[in-house]
Amino acid sequence: MANICEICGKRPVVGYNVSHAHNKTKRRWYPNLQTVRVTKGGQTKKMKVCTRCIRSGLVDKHVVSDKQ
């Protein structure tokens, strides 16, 4: 599965680790994705969403009600 946010499209970025001697090795930075149950169009669905979208309120989390 791809590491892509389903809301904003944030994806891994590529760059270099650079040592003190200026040796470069390739590396990737991954977005902080969380699997969240979301209510969308009256249906509950699991989505991979970055924490920035969750924090800014772009996601309507599914509310689980206690039936006792």
Image (tube, rainbow, N blue to C red):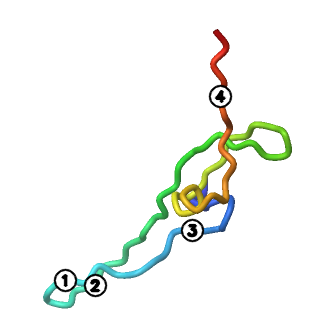
> Residue 48: x, y in percent?
61, 51
Between circles 1 and 3, the one closer to the viewer is: 3
**Disc 2 marks which residue?**
24
Q: Which residue, as the protein is rendered here, is positioned at the far bottom?
A: 22
User: How far apart in space, not on screen, are marks 4 and 2 (Cα)?
Assistant: 48 Å
User: How far apart in space, not on screen, are marks 4 and 1 (Cα)?
Assistant: 48 Å
Residue 19's disc number = 1
Task: Identify the residue at horizontal 14%, vertical 86% (top origin).
Answer: 20
> Residue 25: x, y in percent?
30, 79
Amino acid under disc 3:
Arg
Amino acid under disc 1:
Ser
N-terminal label among 4 and 2: 2
**Disc 4 marks which residue?**
64
Say if mark 3 contacts mark 4, CB within 8 Å.
Answer: no
Callout 2: few (<14), some (14-19), or many (20+) C-alpha neighbours within 10 Å?
A: few
Amino acid under disc 4:
Val
Seen in the picture, residue 65 relative to 21 is either above or below; the reply is above
N-terminal label among 3 and 4: 3
Callout 1: few (<14), some (14-19), or many (20+) C-alpha neighbours within 10 Å?
A: few
Seen in the picture, residue 68 relative to 7 is either above or below; the reply is above
> Residue 9: x, y in percent?
65, 68
Say if mark 1 contacts mark 2, CB within 8 Å.
Answer: yes
Task: Identify the residue at horizontal 60%, vertical 55% (top origin).
Answer: 49
Say if mark 4 contacts mark 2, CB within 8 Å.
Answer: no
- The local secondary structure at tag 4 comes to loop
- The local secondary structure at tag 2 comes to strand
Q: How many marks?
A: 4
**Disc 3 marks which residue?**
11
